[in-house]
Image: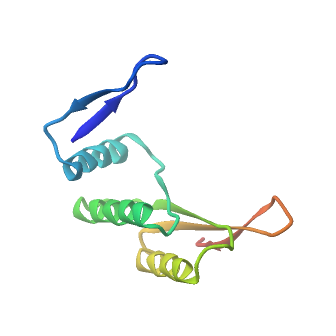
Amino acid sequence: MMVEQSGKRGRALEKKYLDINVYEALQERLDYIFREFDNIYISFSGGKDSGLLLHMAMDYIERNRIRKKIGVFHQDFEAQYQVTTEYVEKVFEMYLSRIEPYWVRSEEHTSELQTHYSIS
């Protein structure tokens, strides 16, 4: 796995190769996150990247028998494909007993956000 380390302004980034694969690196990061933070939230767009992250985090929670719920945030701009909305609904339902879902919809002609989907 390659990690880019930031250099000083104007310099190229230095590449540092680690003797670890992406899956192992994710597990190490999840270990750290669940050990160090009381509140954990995942932003879930319904796309492939955030979807994979959410599924991997839920797998980690199950394998490690973690009982606390994580927050899952979805921002609905009401301009996404219907299939994306259906996928987000399906994923929220699948993990409902282990997450605190937050589905926030931007209302047209206003800057206020309203909660569309939340569990008490």
Q: Quadrant of residue 50?
A: bottom left
Left or right: 15 in relation to 77 = left
**Residue 116 at x, y percent in the picture:** 68, 73
Image position of 87 with respect to 66: above or below: below
98 or 105: nearer the viewer: 105
**Residue 16 at x, y percent in the picture:** 24, 29
Left or right: 24 in relation to 104 = left
103 or 120: nearer the viewer: 103
Please, which residue is most extreme toward the left here? 19
Q: How many marks?
A: 0
**Residue 119 at x, y percent in the picture:** 58, 72
**Residue 38 at x, y percent in the picture:** 45, 46
Q: Residue at x 52, y 83 (%)?
A: 83
Please, which residue is most extreme toward the right here? 109
110 or 116: nearer the viewer: 110
Q: How is the image coloured?
A: rainbow
Image position of 88 with respect to 42: above or below: below
84 or 95: nearer the viewer: 84
Q: Residue at x 44, y 16 (%)?
A: 8
Left or right: 60 in relation to 78 = left
